[in-house]
Image: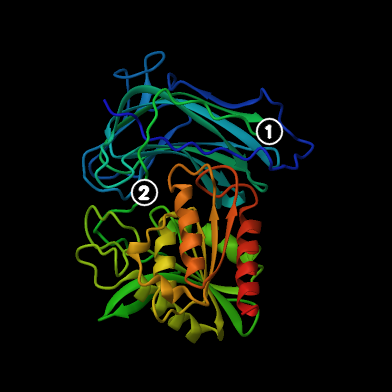
């Protein structure tokens, strides 16, 4: 029996949160759930989309306690779209810390996630945090296959949150069960609950795999990239003219669902100072293992590389607003990080710097490191990251610095994901890129 592959998101003990007068007591539970009550479905929980090959289960067949638990079974060998059980509950206070614990059972599960989601008024998602990851993390890894094991962690609830969503998700094929879920407010970051099984596998960034191209997202621009093959991106104009341009490659599955978060980066993180081009990853085939395929990390059937996609988006954005070509930067996190390295390590790149967060780095996946000379790399990584190993961030800094690039490695507490003042962290990184360019 294989150990589960576990991602536990911890919040830094050094972060300070300003609690409002509605601060929650340490023993105040937001939710205690054993999935026992309900008629046709468990009380308060709803199924996600009706997806071929996915079965939503609530029956007497499995439980770590009592008679019932929530299950997801997926038979089709593709990762997208995501199936989930979800429950949302009101959040009355300000910024806070939330401790979530549960038990999970996996049966040949390629990828399953416990996701904590934060919503403002009007159901606008303002952020999310992966609490746990079960499944294969690198090509060649086996699926998660284990009896009931405990998972948990403490996540920060950002200011402005009105509702909290607890989403139990399955991406790839397999079967996963959830039970004994609790969520409670804690006054400061606690230690994550220990898993009853551990893993030493090195995980890869999350992937997106589905060859059926989704309809164009509302507001997205269809862009011809190469030989009449098109991609999609969103353009958000800047207040200033001429403007800097930030090209954003999201992590996870790279999908359009990240756009509310990207809009927050544009409006509140950068104050509208930059135009933003948010790229949506292209799906070329079933079971695609690379979200953003590049010249060196290709996927069968691809008609253009992510480097070409970035260049085409920069050119198109410059037609929509006057852009300072010396002030074009890339922002990529998790699976969106490697294509940022790839673009900037070309002999000719449309950008002069990149903010790469919580990402892997393999120098053989890119063009010659010597091309990094005079370019800038702001590397943002947590020493506690169990998804993208911290040594890769140090290797990136050392390799690129030796090649003549201007680099910095900023470490943060909390593990894989955005923690604490997300928008402030992004703003600081972009300001560093600006300063490094002006210092050349």
Q: Say few, some or many: other residues with alpha carbon within 10 Å of mark 1 (under 14 / 14 to 19 / 20 or more).
A: many
Q: Say few, some or many: other residues with alpha carbon within 10 Å of mark 2 (under 14 / 14 to 19 / 20 or more).
A: many
- Spatial distance from mark 1 to mark 2, Cα to Cα? 30 Å
Q: Nearer the viewer, residue 40 or 291?
A: 291
Give the vertical position of 363 relative to 156 (above or below).
below
Q: Earlier in the sequence, mark 1 or mark 2?
A: 1
Left or right placement of residue 69 versus residue 266 in this view: left
Determine which quarter of the picture holds residue 111. top left
- Residue 188: numbered disc: 1
Give the vertical position of 236 relative to 387 (above or below).
below
Residue at 31% across, 46% down: 138
Residue at 65% across, 78% down: 439
Q: Nearer the viewer, residue 118 or 347?
A: 347
Please provide percent x and percent y for residue 261.
54, 57
Residue at 31% across, 61% down: 214
Mark 2 — residue? 204
């Amino acid at each position: 029996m294989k150990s589960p592959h576990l991602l536990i998101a911890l919040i830094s003990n050094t972060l300070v949160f300003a609690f409002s007068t509605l601060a929650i007591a340490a023993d105040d539970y937001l939710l205690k759930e054993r999935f026992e009550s309900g008629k046709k479905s468990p009380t308060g929980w709803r199924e996600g989309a009706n997806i071929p090959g996915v079965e939503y289960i609530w029956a007497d067949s499995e439980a770590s306690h009592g008679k019932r638990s929530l299950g997801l079974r997926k038979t089709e060998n593709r990762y997208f779209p995501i199936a989930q059980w979800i429950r949302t509950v009101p959040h009355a206070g300000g910024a806070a810390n939330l401790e979530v614990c549960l038990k999970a059972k996996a049966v040949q599960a390629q990828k399953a996630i416990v996701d904590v989601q934060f919503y403002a008024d009007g159901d606008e998602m303002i952020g999310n945090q992966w609490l746990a990851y079960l499944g294969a993390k690198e090509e060649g890894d086996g699926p998660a296959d284990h009896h009931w094991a405990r998972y948990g962690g403490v996540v920060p609830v950002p200011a402005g949150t009105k509702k909290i969503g607890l989403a139990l998700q399955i991406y790839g094929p397999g079967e996963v069960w959830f039970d004994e879920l609790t969520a409670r407010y804690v006054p400061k970051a606690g230690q994550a609950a220990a898993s009853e099984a551990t893993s030493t596998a090195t995980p890869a960034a999350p992937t997106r795999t589905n060859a059926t191209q989704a309809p164009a997202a509302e507001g997205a621009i269809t862009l011809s990239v190469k030989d009449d093959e098109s991609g999609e991106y969103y353009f958000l104009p800047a207040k200033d003219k001429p403007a800097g341009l930030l090209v954003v490659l999201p992590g996870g599955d790279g999908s359009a669902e990240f756009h509310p978060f990207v809009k927050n980066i544009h409006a509140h993180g950068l104050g509208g100072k930059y135009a933003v081009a948010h790229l949506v990853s292209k799906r070329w085939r079933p079971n695609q293992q690379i979200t953003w395929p590049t010249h060196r990390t290709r996927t069968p059937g691809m008609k253009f590389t992510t480097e070409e996609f970035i260049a085409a988006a920069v050119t198109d954005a410059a037609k929509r607003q006057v852009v300072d070509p010396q002030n074009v930067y890339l922002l990529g996190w998790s699976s969106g990080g490697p294509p940022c390295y790839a673009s900037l390590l070309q002999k000719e790149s449309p950008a002069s710097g990149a903010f790469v967060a919580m990402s892997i780095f393999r120098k053989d996946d890119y063009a010659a490191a010597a091309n990094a000379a005079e370019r800038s790399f702001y590397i943002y990584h947590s020493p506690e990251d169990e998804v993208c190993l911290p040594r890769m961030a140090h290797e990136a800094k050392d390799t690129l610095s030796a090649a003549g690039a201007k680099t910095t490695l900023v470490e943060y507490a909390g593990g894989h994901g955005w923690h604490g003042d997300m928008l402030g962290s992004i703003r600081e990184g972009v300001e560093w890129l600006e300063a490094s360019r002006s210092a050349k």
